[in-house]
Image (spheres, grey):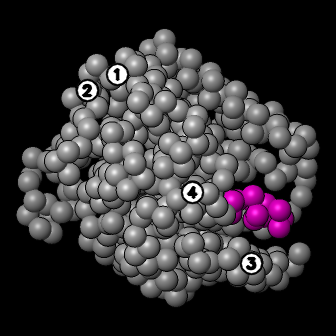
Amino acid sequence: MNDRVEFTKEMKKTYTLLLPNMAPIHFNLLRRVFQNFGYKAKLLEMDNSGVFVEAGLKYVHNDICYPAQLVIGQMISALESGKYDIDKVALVITQTGGGCRASNYLPLLRKALKRAGFEKVPVVSLSLSHMENSGFKITLRMLIQAFAALIYGDVMMILSNQIRPYEKNKGESDALVEKWIKIIGDKFKKNRGFLFGEMKTNLDKMVSSFVKIEKKEEKKIKVGIVGEIYMKYSAIGNNNLIQFLESQGSEVMVPSLFGFVFYCLTNIPQDELYYGHKKLTAIGSNLLMNIFYKTERTMLKAMAKPGCFIVPLPFLEMRKMVNGVIDYGVKMGEGWLLTGEMIDLAHMGYKNIVSVQPFGCLPNHVVSKGMIRKVSEVTGANIVAIDYDPSQTNVNQENRLKLMLSIAKENLNL
């Protein structure tokens, strides 16, 4: 759209950036990163999915995937709420590229803003490959902090999910998460906590603090969640799936968000191998991955040290387990990663797996539903695929989940 409003350098001083909310722990830390670099940033609340869906359906074509309707609906709802000065607010949206409809979120959002009467609200396109806004710059130090935020977020998410169902004092693990978000955020503000040595120290302290939470000795059904990235992490996208599963006597494991970053990076040299893409780009990707692998080893070592937590496989080991099951060239949507995460979850003992998909997301339906039989044969996993869209009812979804859990209970003799 040629009449778009650009986010300028002058706006940085007075405008508030509204950030979409997908994974609350990670995105709360990422919000701190924005603030540390001089941006006024507000993370949108995940408090009323019904309103978001209504706004999404009103301003986004219903053929577009459910995550787009929710994300854009959440932003339009925020602008209509009266909480923000429309003349001093801007929106942030990610641009992933590739063959997913998420690549169209930016024009879809701008079209929706125009229809809703907010065409003067600037939209910041958050992408490493193409930035449209002179007032927003991603620096190397900002990237390093964001990278560290994902690592810290993954550890807090994985540990709190393993503790919450067993804690003697309800709410203790969630309170500890909030405490650590503040601690890490304050360290970021002082330009600390994101270099390798400091991260190692902080991760050890973080894990030790979770170990101290008192737990009850109970037997729970272990359930893993995989699927399209937004549906997998967003409570408004998956109808509070973790909360529901825990209410049914389950302990939940959600794969790391940083694993998706690994997945995107490993696809670059794979493209060079399969399709002759630029060799220099593949070399750069491999160099960056070597740095990430070192940090990943530190993260996994910290979680494994107490001996009481279940720790995911290193990314490269998980990737090897996919070999012979699905080709590495399958990379539309979550591609081969989705299959790899199911195998990894089964390897960790989470053999009851929920695959969450937005209805109409063809790539993820192919690599999710299309691979269930194969993964079940390889791992013995009990897998159920759940679709989410505005027309799906909670009752239908919960009934299918209860059926999966009933099979799990029989297998555990609970």
Of 281 and 387, the residue lying toward us: 387
Q: CA distance from mark 1 to mark 4?
A: 27 Å
* Helix, strand or loop for disc 4: helix
Q: Disc 3 designates what residue? A: 395
Q: Disc 1 designates what residue? A: 12
Q: Is 404 contained in the magenta span?
A: no
Q: Disc 2 designates what residue? A: 8
Mark 3, other Cα within 10 Å: few <14 / some 14–19 / many ≥20 = few
First in sequence, mark 4 or 2: give its number. 2
Residue occupying the point 30% across, 43% down: 125
Q: CA distance from mark 3 to mark 1?
A: 45 Å
Residue occupying the point 67% across, 49% down: 47
The stretch in magenta equals 240-256
Of 330 and 208, the residue lying toward us: 330
Residue occupying the point 82% across, 37% down: 172
* Helix, strand or loop for disc 3: helix
